[in-house]
Image (cartoon, rainbow, N blue to C red):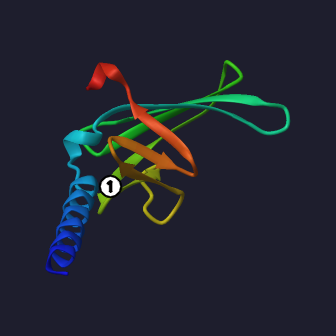
């Protein structure tokens, strides 16, 4: 019984340690270009989304739909816990898009953004 308790305690401790390691990240981890491609809708539109987070707290984002630029935006970003908030036009009370940082990726609405290899 003592072995079982010790094993359970060890497993719980390991889970807590892994959880803390997975949550922590710094600005250095996120500065750079992030890319994601996906297909959406009944027409199977292909989207390529790229955004760049600068070390000065600004970002720029480009959306390519079916090979043509369809949207661009700029603004500021902020790191809060394990999330990155993008504020369009730098307006903290306007449009905000949130990405969760997890295992070296940024995730939003099921879309997984990976850091460009040029920035790693």
Residue closest to the eye, 120 or 75: 120
Q: Position of residue 102 (x, y in %)?
A: 36, 49
Q: Residue at x 33, y 21 (%)?
A: 117
Residue closest to the eye, 63 or 37: 37
Residue positioned most to the bottom: 1
Q: Position of residue 97 (x, y in %)?
A: 50, 54
Quadrant of residue 49 within the rendered picture: top right
Q: Position of residue 108 (x, y in %)?
A: 52, 50
Crowding at dot 1, Cα within 10 Å, few <14 / some 14-19 / many 20+, comes out as: some
Quadrant of residue 81 within the rendered picture: bottom left
Residue closest to the eye, 99 or 22: 22
Q: Is residue 13 left or right of residue 49?
A: left
Q: Is residue 32 left or right of residue 65?
A: left
Q: Is residue 21 above or below residue 28?
A: below
Q: Secondary structure at mark 1?
A: strand
Looking at the rendering, in which quadrant would you find the C terminus? top left
Q: Residue at x 71, y 22 (%)?
A: 66
Residue that numbered label 1 is attached to: 78
Looking at the rendering, in which quadrant would you find the N terminus? bottom left
Q: Residue at x 32, y 55 (%)?
A: 78
Q: Is residue 99 left or right of residue 49?
A: left
Number of numbered discs present? 1
Q: Is residue 67 above or below residue 110?
A: above
Residue closest to the eye, 20 or 60: 20
């Amino acid at each position: 019984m003592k072995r079982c308790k010790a094993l359970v305690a060890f497993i719980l401790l390991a889970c807590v340690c892994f959880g803390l390691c997975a949550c922590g990240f710094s600005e250095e981890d996120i500065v750079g270009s992030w890319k994601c491609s996906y297909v959406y809708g009944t027409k199977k539109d292909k989207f390529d989304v790229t955004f760049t987070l600068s070390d000065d707290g600004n970002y720029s984002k480009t959306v390519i739909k079916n090979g043509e630029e369809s949207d661009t935006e700029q603004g500021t970003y902020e790191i809060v816990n394990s999330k990155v908030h993008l504020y369009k036009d730098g307006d903290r009370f306007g449009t905000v898009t949130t990405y969760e940082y997890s295992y070296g990726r940024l995730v939003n609405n099921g879309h997984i953004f990976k850091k460009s290899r040029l920035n790693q």
